[in-house]
Amino acid sequence: MQTGIDLKKPYGDRLRSGIIALGVLIVLIAVWPFHSVPTGTRGVVTQFGKIVGIEDEGLVVLPPWKKLAIFSIRAEQADINDAEGSTSDTQPVKVSMTVRYSIATDRVSEVYEKYSHNGDLSSYVQTATAEVFKAVTARYSAPDLIAQRATVSSDISAALKTKIAQYGAMVINIDMTGFSFSPSYMSAINEKVTQEQLRLGAENKLLTVEAEQKQKVAVAEAEASAQRARADGEAYSNLKIAEAQAEALKVQNAALAQNKDVLELRRIQVEQTKAEKWDGKLPEAIYAGAPIPFLNVGSK
């Protein structure tokens, strides 16, 4: 039993057999019914140029008169460099953005027919982003565009979603970079920021000085209050002492008035105290009554 081309056959027969085999192979390739749709893509089925179906990922079996085109629905990226706009106060502004988007799965047929055979809409997204940026920046003044950058980014994202939806695409996210104004305006902004910082620094210093002065005044007032309190306390104490002394004198006078012998008793007590403390020596000089001043009783 022999397989393939019989080398014993004449050359012409072998050539004819080879041509037939090649033709069969070409026909098999042309009518091969088995196809695959990779993950992250969709298969666009056409018949004589007309879209007749969209296939999901996986194995697809098609008759030979239908064709399969692979269409990406993965996230794509469009880079927009130095998009130009103008603020409401006529300040030119530039920005660079990266927009990530993908094709809506329910609009693959529309996008394939109208815009792209492979899912790449970067040129449409770039144009739409530049238009949206101009429209949004025109609603803001230059200072507001700087101060409200998050709001501006949100407005651009919302407007761009609406804009590129007409192409069957969905915005995933937007990254804004290189947001800048003209050099002269940026210099003016920097100068304004510097002056504002100096002003705030001066105000803070003034507030610090005022706080220190208030603290000193409070301390002085507290010390004065303390001194007044001490003086009031001393005066009150002296008053009470004087009242007590006066009361004591009243009691003593009343006692003397009631008993004349109290003074004599006190004199006797004093003399008794002196006698108890006497050391037995006579004084050398004795004071007598006037006019005799002294009498010397000491021995020579």
Image (cartoon, rainbow, N blue to C red):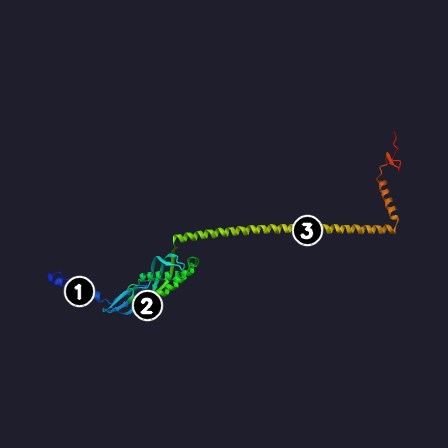
Residue 115 lies in quadrant: bottom left
* Residue 226 in sight from this viewpoint: yes
Quarter of the picture containing the N terminus is bottom left
Marked residue nearer the N-terminal end (1 or 2):
1
Sooner in the amino-acid sequence: mark 3 or mark 1: 1
Position in image of residue 271 (x %, y %): 86, 42
Q: Is residue 171 above or below residue 288?
A: below
* Pick the front one: 219 or 2: 219
Residue 2 pos. (x, y %): 15, 63
Q: Position of residue 265 (x, y in %)?
A: 87, 46
Marking on residue 23:
1
Q: Secondary structure at mark 3?
A: helix
Q: Which residue is mark 3?
A: 228
Tell me the CA gap for discs 1 and 2. Answer: 40 Å
Would you identify the image quadrant in which residue 75 lies? bottom left
Question: Residue flagged by tag 1: what amino acid is it?
Answer: Gly
- Along the line of sight, the residue nearer the viewer: 210 or 7: 210
Tell us which disc is closer to us: 3 or 1. Answer: 3
Closest to the observer, 222 or 285: 222
Residue 107 got which mark? 2
Given residues 233 and 42, the one toward you in this image is 233
Chain-order first, disc 3 or disc 2: 2
Q: Amino acid at mark 2?
A: Arg
Task: Name the residue at 57% across, 51% down.
Answer: 210
